[in-house]
Image (cartoon, rainbow, N blue to C red):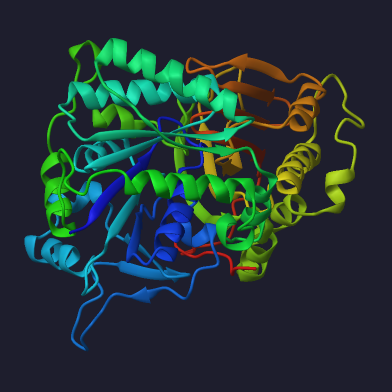
Amino acid sequence: MTRIMTITSGLPGTGKTHLAINIALEQVRRGRQVGVFYARESATPIDKLLLVQQPVSMLRRVGDSNERGLLRSGYQGIDIISCGTPLREWPTIQAEQRMGCIKEMDVQEGYDDLLIDTSGMDARTLLASCRASGVVVLVVTPEPRSRAEAFALIRVLHLNGFAGLLRLIVNKARCLAEAKEIHNEFHRQVNSRLGQDVPLLGVLPLDENVNRAQRARQAFTAVFPESEAAAGIVVVADALEDIPVHFSSGPRTLSALWHALIEVIQLPVMLAGGTLLNDEIEMTRTLEQPSEAPVYSQDKETGLFQFQGNLENLCAVRDRLQSDLQVFLTDLDAFVDAAGRNACVLADAKDGRLQRNQIINLVSRLLGIVEAAYPMQSFRFQVADTVVSHPDAAWLQAGHYMKYIFHMMQSELSDTAQILLLNVPAMNVTTGVDGETIYELIDTVRHSYLNVMSDPQNGVRIQAWLTNEVAPVVDVVSLVQRRAPAG
């Protein structure tokens, strides 16, 4: 029999992935066979957070196909499992392929514990994982919005008939008294409004050793076993042993879990107010086409380059580019030039405008600030050759542009980065409909545009449009699936 737990929250950045890893490690130390399932489409997948063993394709016979895209990695006794086909698409793939996925997800002896890390999952898959599990562990932090989003998640689960066990972990607490106060208030609200109990599973203090371990790409209980955070994990594991094996609901084997997920993920999702989850609306708001972007007519856009990895590896991608991509290779050199980060971006700013090289230097300094604080920060970088015609009069002129997009999943800009942006001439600062802060610089004279969005829900995104009078002599480059080498 497998104990199946979903680790989730209503807000990114609460520490779900690190908790899943370290809880799993503690269970392994207690002699249990443990697996952790994660979404490979997550902004910071487990195999990028940890120095895992070489991923092994889960093929068992010479004639097996690799079309399922299953990977199993190892880390100090944990099986780390992911699938190239997102769970959301499982109901649509061929039955034979789906059955192959289900069969190969388990080990021969079966797992004692399987933890599902919901980081990076879309709303429907996250809810389905919770509804199909026997135990759901909610992670909250002292940040008020974290608790508000967690309450909203419980409310949606309640509306859709969730009958499993809920447990709460307070992460990054400054002291035990604060954590208990957070739990007492949260439990009171959930119980009075929804009639649901949310017992406290454990408390993890704000511990610098967690960040130190993250920078080393290791689990904090492995490299700092005497830390306060590691002691908190032991308490959580002890509390898990008090949960009866016969859960009140939920599947008890991996095969039953996957079949339940396939069934539940296709069901309508009821939201507050009697409305249904509209996945089409949810999917239209992509990183590449943000809702607040200026209106314009775009003839075409050719994706030239895409990279996903850690900030410290950005420099490494330059060596992998073809020489005929010189149009944006020079810009890329400037973006990652350490010397450029120390230059003054405000020099020679006339009439409140920044020239093309000054915008590049400003972005470089922003990246430098983020990398200095979070060297292992996962981010996404894209370059596109864009042709604009019939522009809005308040925005860019018609012409050729190189569009650069940097996206990082940290919850907000640091104070240093905000001060830097606020001191840029003609910088326009607004608040979006969802509470995000938007920094915008438009220069119709020099044909350039800079947009920096700081969104607690979707991270920090930097978008720069730079004029390009000559179209790049290059075909579409197939680098979308490649990643910079580790280290």
Q: Is residue 247 above or below residue 393?
A: below
Closer-to-camera residue (439/212):
212
Picture residue at 52% right of the left edge, 59% below the top? 48
Q: How many marks?
A: 0
Image quadrant in which you'd find residue 8? top left
Closer-to-camera residue (439/97):
97
Instruction: State the quadrant of the N terminus.
Output: bottom left
Q: Is residue 379 visible?
A: no
Q: Is residue 217 above or below residue 357?
A: below
Picture residue at 19% right of the left edge, 30% below the top? 162
Q: Is residue 430 above or below residue 463?
A: above
Q: Position of residue 429 (x, y in %)?
A: 67, 17
Q: Position of residue 87 (x, y in %)?
A: 24, 50
Closer-to-camera residue (334/416):
416
Q: Image check: 407 left or right of 343? A: left
Q: Image check: 200 left or right of 280? A: right
Picture residue at 53% right of the left edge, 64% below the top? 483
Q: Position of residue 220 (x, y in %)?
A: 59, 55
Q: Is residue 464 visible?
A: yes
Picture residue at 55% right of the left edge, 67% below the top? 51
